[in-house]
Image (cartoon, grey):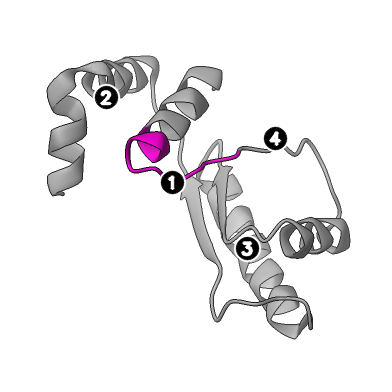
Amino acid sequence: GNELLGLTAWLGSVERVPVQSHVLESADDHALVEFLCVHRVFCLIAGARDQAALKDKKAWVERLRDQLAKDSRWYLPSFWSIIMEPWDDSTLARVIAQLKQPLGYGMARQA
């Protein structure tokens, strides 16, 4: 978790794009819309433990998009979201190892 957030921030800093992460344990939709508008957040990354959770998260993100579109403080035409499915330990370790290699960044940049 923390190592992946650190790598995300590192990738952003390489391109001189500031990346701030906020871990939200829980919040109702209204509080989250308030947070997103006030802090000018344009991308949300969420995780899903399994297929049922993935379906629920997709529906939740669509509700969030609808609420943002209706909020007068929302300033963008769209809201980006990424819903990550769980990786097994070996996949996560492989991705982290590849990103730590000097060529890892170059390969990611070409994609």
- Mark 3 Cα-neighbour bin, 10 Å: few <14, some 14–19, many ≥20: some
Majority secondary structure in the magenta region: loop
Name the residue at 17% across, 20% down. Answer: 102
Chain part drawn in magenta: 11-20
How far across and how far down the image is residue 41, in percent? Answer: 63, 57
Mark 1 or 3, which is nearer the eye? 1
Dot 1 or dot 3, earlier in sequence: 1
Query: From what the image shows, is residue 62 above or below residue 49?
Result: below
How far across and how far down the image is residue 45, in percent? Answer: 54, 47
Dot 2 or dot 4, earlier in sequence: 4
- Which residue matches tag 1? 17
Dot 4 or dot 3, earlier in sequence: 4
Name the residue at 43% across, 46% down. Answer: 17
Dot 3 or dot 2, earlier in sequence: 3
- Which residue matches tag 3? 61
What is the CA distance from the residue labelled 1 to the residue labelled 3? 24 Å
- What type is the residue that disc 3 sits on? Val
- Which residue matches tag 4? 23
What is the CA distance from the residue labelled 2 to the residue labelled 4? 22 Å
Q: Are marks 2 and 4 in contact (CB under 8 Å)?
A: no
- Which residue matches tag 2? 99
